[in-house]
Image (cartoon, rainbow, N blue to C red):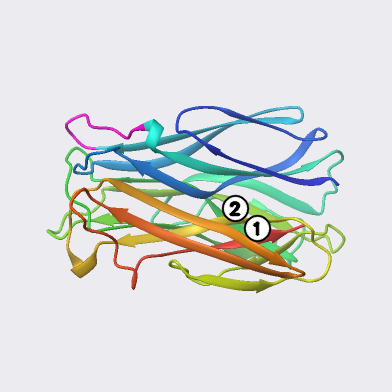
Amino acid sequence: MPLQILSAQVQPNTTKNFTFADTIVQRMVGISAFSLSYGNKDHHVQTVSISLSVNQQGNTLSITPHATLVDSSGNNLDPGASSVSVVAVAYVGVDPNTIKFGNAGSIPNGGTSGGIVVPCTSPRVLQSALAGYNLSFGSSDHHMETAAAAVGTQLSGNSASITGQAQMYDDSGHSASIATVDGGLLASCDDTLGMYVVPTDSLQGSGQVLTFPTGPSHYIALLSGFRVQYRNNSDHHVKTIAANLVVQSVSGNSVTVTGKATLVDGSGNTQDDSVSNVNGFVIGY
């Protein structure tokens, strides 16, 4: 099958090789989950970020998830207590010229990527995935109340762009001076590709059943965005910030997906589940 998807949970700043069955002619990378933690202590936050470095050689993608959770005193994340779940979507062999997979980086809050030419003006599939984010207070650190990052899509003719939403702030009026996202794009004008994409609702610890057409035998989830916020509109230190979207079970063409966004400090303060959530989509193929 020329459409192939591989995934792995990777420790930050280590490289994972994804080897496909043939030469990669189209590819997109995204994330399905992350957990960034200082370890057994909590601290202020100056910057929290994830980015994916990708090197392509023939049928292999070498992907390194770079991650930061740092304050202004030099405290950084504990790699052993942190992870990023990377998803690589590839078309291998001969390019059919009916699909476009790609990535764009450093999309500002409220902004868009440059135009990405897709093969038609009415794609059968047009979906963006979160591939990273950079939220920073700049030269100082603060408590965190809320952090959020999300991507979407726009289409004008046959030019698609990835939209970005990103923010971080405390309860004292400080907000991120740097707020960007990285995104991946899946576009298909091919009715015979056998790739189906179904978006999720906003999820927070609950499951949702997605219904697919008959045909797919493999399913994988990717994040489009997340939002975490402490309870009572208050701000605190951060010990761990995390988000995940997971295919929990499959029954015929019904797929149950679960997801959650998490924010905790070392004193028992946790996220407000009424406003914290993740969203994304599931690929069936």
Earlier-in-chain disc, 2 versus 1: 2
Majority secondary structure in the magenta region: loop
For this view, does 256 lie left or right of residue 229? right
Q: Tell me the element at label 2.
A: loop
Please state, as top left, top right, bottom left or bottom right, where the C terminus lies in the image.
Answer: bottom right
- Residue placed under numbered mark 1 in the picture: 159
Nearest the viewer among 168 and 219 is 219
Residue 237, relative to residue 60: is it above or below? below
Instruction: Tell me, yes or no, whether the two marked residues, 2 and 1, touch with CB atoms within 8 Å.
Output: yes
* 74 inside magenta stretch: yes
For this view, does 281 lie left or right of residue 132? right
- Residue placed under numbered mark 2 in the picture: 115
Number of residues whose C-alpha sits closer than 10 Å to that of mark 1, classed few (under 14), some (14–19) or many (20 or more): some
Q: Tell me the element at label 1.
A: strand
User: Residue visible at 75% across and 70% down?
Assistant: 253
Q: Picture coordinates of residue 204 (x, y %)?
A: 43, 67
Residue 39 shows which numbered tag?
none
Residue type at tag 1 = Ser
Residue 161 visible within the image: no
Q: Picture coordinates of residue 272 (x, y %)?
A: 29, 67
Which contiguous range is marked in magenta? 71-78
Residue 175, relative to residue 202: is it above or below? above
Q: Picture coordinates of residue 128 (x, y %)?
A: 58, 57
* 104 inside magenta stretch: no
Residue type at tag 2 = Gly
